Amino acid sequence: MAKKRPYEHRKVQKEVKDIEMYQCIVCNMVDAKAHGHHLIPYREGGAANLQNMVTMCPDCHRRYHAGTLNIDIERF
């Protein structure tokens, strides 16, 4: 089981979703179950801040982590 992220981390994930109104940056779908996604992965030292987070719907987020969706982080 994955270790639960610190409160401050989860707070920023919620904040980015609120700012982006739960709209996925890939497909533009609005989803109450949207995820806060790190552009630079957390496990690779990516910061838990608004500059490193975007909102993704659960489907696009799964596709990204499965390797079937590529995001060009240079556009952000």
Image (spheres, helix red, strand yellow):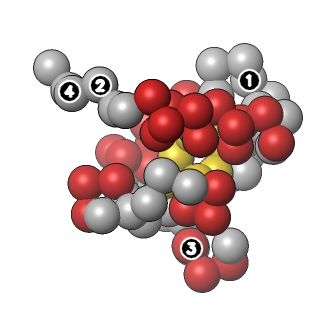
Residue 59: in sight, yes or no?
no
Label 4, label 2: how far apart the Cα atoms are: 6 Å
For the residue marked with disc 2, what is the amino acid?
Lys
Q: Is residue 29 left or right of residue 16?
A: right
Q: Are marks 4 and 1 in contact (CB under 8 Å)?
A: no
Q: Which residue is mark 1?
A: 31
Label 4, label 3: how far apart the Cα atoms are: 26 Å
- Residue at 39%, 62% in the rendered image: 46
Q: Are marks 2 and 1 in contact (CB under 8 Å)?
A: no
Q: Residue 40 location in percent, x, y?
A: 42, 65
- Name which of mark 4 and mark 3 comes first in the sequence: 4
Q: Residues within 10 Å of mark 4 (few under 14, many from 20)?
A: few
Q: Which residue is mark 3?
A: 72
Displayed quadrant of residue 15: top right
Task: Please identify the quadrant where the C terminus is shown.
Answer: bottom right
Q: Is residue 74 left or right of residue 63?
A: right
Q: Are marks 2 and 3 in contact (CB under 8 Å)?
A: no
Label 2, label 3: how far apart the Cα atoms are: 27 Å
For the residue marked with disc 3, what is the amino acid?
Asp
- Name which of mark 2 and mark 3 comes first in the sequence: 2
Residue 32: in sight, yes or no?
yes
Measured along the vertical axis of the image, is residue 1 above or below residue 66? Answer: above
Mark 4 or mark 1, which is nearer to you? 4
Label 4, secondary structure: give it.
loop
Q: Which residue is mark 4?
A: 2
Measured along the vertical axis of the image, is residue 43 above or below residue 76? Answer: above
Label 3, label 1: how far apart the Cα atoms are: 22 Å
Label 4, label 1: how far apart the Cα atoms are: 24 Å
- Residue at 63%, 19% in the rendered image: 33
Q: Which residue is mark 2?
A: 4
